[in-house]
Image (spheres, rainbow, N blue to C red):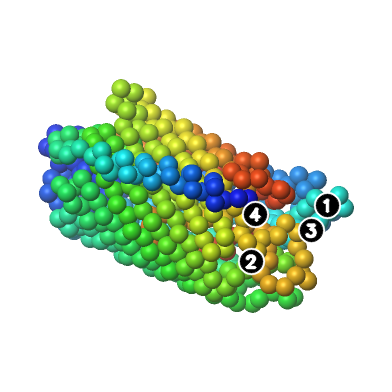
Amino acid sequence: MKTEKSRTLSALTSAALAIPAVAVSTNAIADAPPTMTEVGYRYSQYQEDDIAESNKVKDVGSTKRYDINIHQFRVLTPVGDNYSVDATFDYETMSGASPLGTIQGADGDPLLVMSGASIDDTRMDLNVKTTRYYENGNASIVGGYSTEDDYEAFNLGLEGEKHINDKLTTLMGGIGYSDDTIEPTPAPGRVTEEEKYTATTFIGIAQVINAESVLQTSINYAYSDGYLSDPYKLVDQRPDSRSSIAWNTRYRYYLGSLDAAVHADYRLYVDDWDMLSHTIGFEWHQNIDPNLRVIPSFRYYSQSQADFYRPYDNASIEGDKSSDYRLSPFGAVTFGLSAVAHSYNWKIIISAERYIADGDLALGTVETEHPGLLQYTLLTVGFDYAF
Amino acid sequence: MNHKIVSHKVMLLPMLLVALGMAGCTAVQPWERGELARTEMKWDPDPMKSALRDHIYFSKEGSSGGASSGGGGCGCN
């Protein structure tokens, strides 16, 4: 978080970094760590809409989907003259029923087989990023650990940025590795312990277009190998590898006449499960006065189905198969609104979001909409404080 | 769903945007970069918010991937 005080100082001494991707320094020449230690906390409540009775098998399982409470903690602090540490810790508690499968109902429409009353679970995630700053760039090591009652994951990564062309152009790249182990709750016929490995890499470039706008584009490649199926589904067998490419482009534009910043993001995703998706996001950061900002946002998403996706479970079919809604074709919209009250070393945030997935929102034609498509509401309150 | 037609047309738009953006660059002097340093002009003005959004979308949709070296996984259902 860039404080009001140091931002004014930077502008006056013409020391502002051209690309606002990293903590801004008061020194015109070198990249530098943040000038203050910042702590942040967010509390979020995530609530999925209940399943309609008409979308599930009668008298089997619960209509109540997931409720999740999320606590996020963050500390960003300079260490010495050339380093910073950025640590985040997430603590989530969740409960709710889950779709176990999908069968064909009497009228031919798919029906969800829902699990029972509640799967109570706790998830914790710790992530630490250590950054070394250089004259024209920075390099980071990222490490993380996350755990749930039935799941454990380690991840490690390296990232770097290099500023060139009088800091108007930034080159960036990184590699990452993740090792995930699942030990599902025991059940007859269910796997007991499985592993998955994921390797990722990305490269990107950011460019100052003019005094009001910046553009960034990057490509991310990921390869996963191991157990990729869902052990809680009645009929679910997925390939033992997945290869994907995501192409992200981001644009930021400052509208001086309105004192607002416009954010436009686009991601194209393709993988070897034959899935293709488009994601478009917009945010309008409107300054109301020097201490208040309002941010309406909109996101549109559309995905095609995985090539082994089937609307109805059929255990007798050979090969890969899954009726998981996350592999089905659908579109989704998210409407959001945030308000940020801020002063030179603190910030209070309130935000609300509504997500609606529907077959009719997809770019292509969806013949059979999955009955498990999601709707949820997300509410967040939080603060940041620098000292 | 027929994606070939849709994806070619839609892919042109971001490619055009990137090409135009890069081609139309001006040499912005350091003393002119004040607006670019605004919090609301950052790629990610609220890292905790975007981390939570990324996690939710990764868990509840079929796609993944952003400009980062990846993060923790989850056995999300």
> Which residue is denoted by mark 2 in the rendering?
A230
User: Quadrant of residue A156 in the image?
Assistant: bottom left
Q: Foreground mark, 3 or 4? A: 4
Give the labeled residue for mark 3. A103
Q: CA distance from mark 1 to mark 4?
A: 17 Å
Residue on which disc 1 sits: A108
Q: Chain of mark 4?
A: A
Compared to residue A324, the image places residue A11 above or below, namely above
Q: CA distance from mark 3 to mark 1?
A: 9 Å
- The type of residue carrying mark 1 is Gly
- Place of residue A223 in the rendered image (x, y in percent of width and height, measured from the top left): 47, 68
Q: Is residue A263 left or right of residue A13?
A: right
The numbered mark 2 sits on a residue in which chain?
A: A
The answer to which of marks 3 and 4 sits earlier in the sequence is 3
Whether residue A10 is visible to the viewer of this picture, yes or no, is no
Task: Report which residue position mark 4 lands on.
Answer: A328
Secondary element under disc 2, as helix, strand or loop, is: loop
Residue A16 visible at all = yes
Answer yes or no: do the residues labelled 1 and 4 have beta carbons within 8 Å?
no
Q: Secondary structure at mark 4?
A: loop
